[in-house]
Image: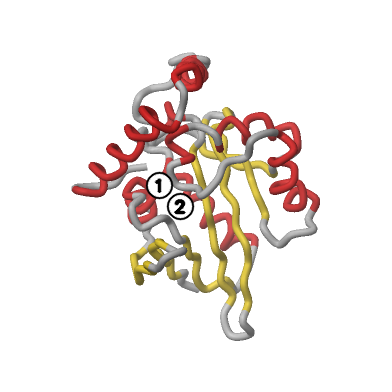
Amino acid sequence: MAGAGGGWDIVANFVSWLLAHAFPSKETLDFNASVREWSDDEPHDLSNALISFRPMTRDDFPDVLRWRTTPHVTAWFRSAPRDLEMVEEKFGPRIDGSQRVQVDVLLVNLKPVGYMQHQMRDDGERKIAEIDFLIGEYRYINRGVGSRAIAEYSARIARLNPGVSQIISQPNIRNGRSAGALAKAGFKRVVDVAADTVNQVVYVLDLQH
């Protein structure tokens, strides 16, 4: 997902630092090898690719573990799962329906490349959906996927949840790539939340009924 200006420099420098200092050389090589596993049979511009979603299952957990431990993803999370047991602990209840968060695999031309998730909130006056997302396959970043995935996932939420008035997302304040994708999908930046433990931007998509 694309950012602009100084945000790009911050993201690039931070990821470069992670690659140089936070990951041993063997793991860096393993990451690069995992990227090359994908055959380069996709056009560079995927803005017209087929975007679809399906519910996450436990069969997706190896992919989730790999996605959540790649450098371009770990830069934006406080911690990464170390093994499949930790993935089960986090995502198992969501799959089973014992948590309110619904998580779906993001498919591009039927290939799993990341995931989207959302949670409904209802304060009695408004029904709001909060979304989160990531593209785990690095080769699918900056290729027209992120903003379309957000827009289509938001439309899907609105269609399946009549009465929802807003969809919100809260990326890290330094994550220009996610911010750019949200803006392209029609979200508006409404507030910055910066504190010792929280460093986020709130983006809102107002839905018309």
Is 22 above or below relative to 170? above
Q: Position of residue 71 (x, y in %)?
A: 45, 33
Q: Specify the amino acid type for callout 1.
A: Ser
The answer to whether residue 34 is left or right of residue 17 is right
The answer to whether residue 22 is left or right of residue 86 is left
Quadrant location of residue 192? bottom left
Q: Which residue is mark 1?
A: 147
Q: Position of residue 5 (x, y in %)?
A: 19, 47
Quadrant location of residue 125? bottom right
- Crowdedness near tag 1: few (<14), some (14–19) or many (≥20) residues, C-alpha within 10 Å: many
Is 176 above or below relative to 203? above
In contact (CB < 8 Å): disc 2 and disc 1:
yes
Which element is circle 1 on? helix
Along the viewing direction, whichever of 83 and 108 lies nearer the viewer: 83
Q: Specify the amino acid type for callout 2.
A: Ala
Q: Which residue is mark 2?
A: 151
Q: Residue at x 62, y 40 (%)?
A: 81
Between the C-alphas of marks 2 and 1, the distance is: 6 Å
Q: Quadrant of the N terminus?
A: top left
Is 64 above or below relative to 41? below
